[in-house]
Structure formats: C-alpha cells, structure tokens
Amino acid sequence: MKRLIAEGKFDPKSQLTVSEQNLIDCSGDFGTTGCKGGMPQQAFKYVAANKGIMGADAYPYAGKLCLYDDQKDDCVYNPAKRVDVDVKKGKRLKTGRDEQLVTAIYTYGPVAIAVHVTKNMAAYKSGIFDDSKCIAKKVNHAVVAVGYHPDYFIVRNSWGAKWGESGYIRIARRKTNTCGISQQAWYPIVPNAVNTEAMRDRLLERPELGVGVIGPQTNDTSDTENETRDYESRQ
C-alpha cells in the first residue's frame, strides 16, 4: 500500500474490508452497545483480544433495526474465517489537527474517525463535500478515513455501495476539521507496520503525485500528552 501511495497509484477501494457486523454483534464485552454504537478503542481491544476479525465478505453488514442493547445472541463469529490482525495498542490524535490525520493515514493506513452527519451528508451523491451546517464538536457517526488529496479526505462509510461515491465520500480540506473529520481520530498500532520514512521522502521529492505532502514527524509530544491516549491489548 505504501508503495502505491508513493507512486500515486493507490486505490482505497482495493483494501481488504473487515466486518462491521462482526464488531456490532460480538464486541459487547469490550464496552460497545451493538448497533447503538461504540468507540474505536473498544473495537481495537476486541480485535486485539480476538487476534483478528472476519472480513466483510464472510460476515456481511446486515443493517438491522436496533431493537435492543444486548446482541450477544446474534454473534456468528467463525475463527476459521478470521483475518489475522496483531493489534497491540491504539492512539488518538490531537483534536482538530488535520495534518496529524494526514500523517497517520500515510504512516499507518486507514484511521477510525467520527463525523457530524447532516441531512446534506446523508443525501450525498458525489463531489467534494462541505456543509456549513456541519458542527465539528457534534460528531455522531463513525467512519474510516482511507486517503487524502490536497483538496479533500477520502472517507469510507458503512451505508453500502449505493450511497455516495460507491460507499465513499470526499470531505473538503478547505478549512480545518470539516464536519469533525479530525475531532476523534484513532488508529491501531500493529507491530509489523512498515517504516515509511523513505516513502515520505519520496513524496516530498514528487509533489506532482497529488496525494499530499507530509513532513517528517517529530518526537515532541509535550503539547499533546493529555490528548493522546494509549492502551495496551489484553494478554
């Protein structure tokens, strides 16, 4: 994936999609509330303890009505069809820092985020989305940021391929934290993650690729210590 990004050939729709329904049905012991919601860090803990999660093709999204809180009986997880994922911990980015979101997408891959869904976003069909009615501090829906461009972020929704641009939306970067895109951003830390310093250098040398320019990361966390939360996976 990192090579494709650096060469300007990355298609986020080519990524393996893991199962939202697996999380909805099976992660209640980690603090989620079925189809009524949950937090990214709770999902990461479930995947870490489970040593993986099923793919969306093997455990498809059902889109069922949310009639009750306890959905344990609905869990049909099959370890034989598990996608092995070795998640050790997760991090939350500093609130409202779009540049950190860009760096995290490139360095670690897709990032779990939340956005404020308005009527206009619910009716989105195509194009670069920006809605003055979006309020960053009122995020109400979890989605995944999978890519970026100088003008927009590429976001994958869970409402099926008939919504938006085959299930995706492009959210404008003309202003910071549009629709709350960097309000609550979390990503998992995977031990075998590829070091992408060389790839960042290539991006800096080739701005014509049009996937955004990422500067070197720093180790100075003095201003973010209180806003960055880590967790260790259950052993």
Image (cartoon, rainbow, N blue to C red):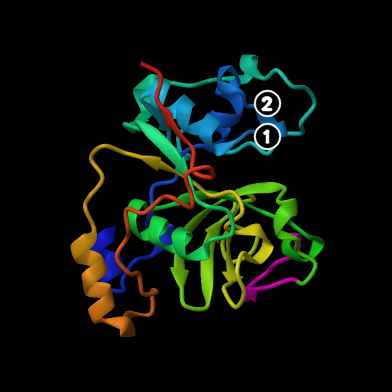
Start-end of magenta stretch: 122-131
Q: Position of residue 125 (x, y in %)?
A: 67, 69
Q: Are marks 1 and 2 in contact (CB under 8 Å)?
A: yes
Q: Quadrant of residue 181?
A: bottom right
Say whether residue 60 is visible: no
Say whether residue 128 is visible: yes
Q: Residue at x 31, y 38 (%)?
A: 190
Under circle 2, the secondary element is: loop
Quadrant (top left, top right, bottom left, bottom right) of the C terminus: top left
Q: Position of residue 64 (x, y in %)?
A: 71, 34
Tell me the kind of residue under disc 1: Gly
Q: Residue at x 72, y 54 (%)?
A: 137
Q: Quadrant of residue 28?
A: top right
Q: Which residue is mark 1?
A: 37
- The question of residue 123 being in magenta is answered with yes
Q: CA distance from mark 1 to mark 2?
A: 5 Å
Q: Quadrant of residue 164?
A: bottom right
